[in-house]
Image: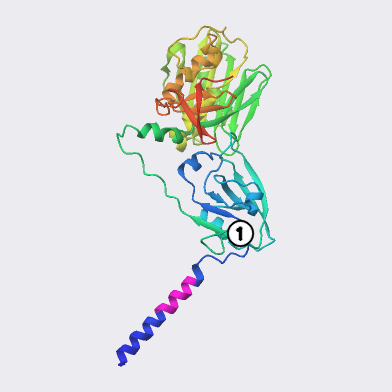
């Protein structure tokens, strides 16, 4: 063998040796205990069924019979969000964590049950066995834990007649709203909002987000000779501690006026108000100026869901058919509309609306975009729960 041949042989040997070393370093650790779990990446359907899971997670693709996971009543289809408190970002990570455990070790999995009506996390513990049950035949030895990728289905073909019917249901994800109240005032807001202020006579109701600048306010007062301009300017400066600039008034239906505003602290938002005699009633949404594009509609929808038994409020009147059902309360749909129902006609500008289910859960939707013409229970608004599409009904429940 010549000198060049020796060099080539040495080079090939080094490459093979490096490959063996890399394989030894990067291959999955050899399992030391048996759990019976098999993980997969989250499918789009599983992701849609777990709205409480902000990101990450791994789906349990299979549970072997008579395994520790089976005895712990863990079921295929559930989503793992954490193992022993470690947040799970992928099926491979979940598999690697389980593979490191030996017989007799105990772990706790935080699961989201996507097969039942309520989607709430639960903690389940299991203890590893040394080996699978006697008599079981497996193609992989030892069959401790597996992870595999499940690729998402292709996006529906453009203009295909079945696309919207199949795809729309699982992807309609209305925003869940929670009820807040004080005195004879109540409102629907996203999670992690709180009541910031309330007056005993129900002339003021103020709610806000816990961790960001987002305020929704309902206020009524007597003008006592002050102009609406002066009253609004003074009220905004007192509330937010900074001089304010307002756009010119824009007239809306039913005697309402809307004005956008901003201040030198970076706040922005809108005021919707109506003056009747000596009384002014206003609905206010305030957000950071940089987030106004997306945050103002959301906070505005919170403000327009406020209902208070405020002093001097006009009597209930029949519904005007110009008000869409997704803007008003159920009592208004039945013919008894208050001033908030008429104010909420501004939701058509914000392109949002209220829907609810039979249990009284409230959601925020985009009425035009989220309307499902071919829903299983007929045209309407839907959301997915427990693997099924639940039909939602229009209107607020307060």
User: Looking at the image, which residue is at 55% across and 24% down?
Assistant: 357
Compared to residue 165, the image places residue 108 above or below, namely below
Where residue 230 appears, x then y in whole percent? 51, 19
| Residue neighbourhood size for the residue with mark 1, other residues' Cα within 10 Å, grouped as few (<14), some (14–19), many (≥20) | few
Count the marks: 1
Where is residue 286 drawn, in percent x and y?
Answer: 52, 30
In the displayed structure, would residue 110 be above or below residue 360?
Answer: below
Q: Which of the image's four quarters has the C terminus?
A: top right
Which residue appears farthest toward the front when viewing the image? 135
Query: Which region of the structure is painted magenta?
Result: 15-23
Nearer to the camera, 271 or 158: 158
**Residue plotted at (46% across, 14% down):** 256
The one nearer the camera, 224 or 107, is: 107
Q: Which residue is mark 1?
A: 135
302 magenta-colored: no
In the image, is residue 253 above or below residue 82?
above
């Amino acid at each position: 063998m010549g000198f060049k041949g020796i060099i080539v042989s040495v080079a090939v040997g080094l490459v093979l040796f490096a490959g063996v070393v890399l394989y030894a370093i990067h291959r999955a650790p050899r399992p030391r205990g048996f759990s019976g779990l098999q993980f997969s990446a989250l499918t789009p359907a599983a992701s849609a069924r777990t709205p409480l899971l902000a990101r990450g997670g791994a789906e349990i693709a299979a549970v072997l019979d008579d395994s520790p996971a089976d005895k712990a009543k863990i079921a295929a289809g559930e989503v793992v969000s954490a193992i022993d408190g470690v947040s799970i970002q992928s099926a491979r990570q979940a598999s690697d964590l389980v593979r490191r455990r030996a017989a007799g070790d105990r772990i706790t999995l935080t699961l989201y049950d996507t097969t039942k009506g309520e989607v709430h996390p639960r903690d389940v513990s299991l203890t590893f066995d040394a080996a699978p049950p006697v008599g079981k035949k497996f193609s992989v030895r030892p069959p401790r834990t597996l992870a595999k990728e499940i690729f998402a289905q292709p996006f529906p073909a453009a203009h295909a007649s079945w696309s919207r019917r199949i795809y729309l249901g699982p992807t309609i994800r209305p925003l869940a709203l929670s009820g807040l109240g004080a005195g004879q005032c109540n409102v629907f807001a996203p999670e992690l909002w709180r009541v910031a202020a309330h007056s005993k006579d129900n002339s003021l109701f103020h709610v806000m987000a816990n961790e960001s600048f987002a305020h929704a306010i309902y206020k009524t007062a007597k003008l006592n000779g002050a102009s609406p301009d002066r009253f609004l300017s003074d009220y905004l400066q007192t509330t937010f501690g900074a001089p304010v600039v307002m756009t010119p008034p824009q007239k809306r239906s039913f005697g309402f006026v809307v004005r956008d505003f901003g201040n030198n602290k970076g706040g922005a938002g809108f005021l919707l108000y109506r003056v009747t005699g000596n009384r002014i009633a206003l609905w206010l949404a305030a957000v950071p100026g940089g987030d106004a594009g997306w945050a103002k509609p959301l906070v505005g929808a919170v403000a327009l869901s406020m209902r208070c038994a405020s002093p001097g409020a006009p009597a209930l009147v029949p519904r005007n058919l110009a008000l869409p059902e997704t803007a008003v309360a159920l009592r208004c749909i039945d013919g008894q509309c208050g001033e908030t129902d008429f104010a909420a006609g501004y939701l058509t500008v914000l392109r949002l609306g209220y829907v609810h289910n039979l249990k009284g859960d409230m959601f925020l939707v985009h009425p035009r975009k989220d309307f499902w013409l071919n829903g299983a229970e007929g045209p309407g608004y839907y959301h997915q729960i427990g693997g099924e599409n639940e039909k939602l009904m229009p209107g607020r429940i307060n």
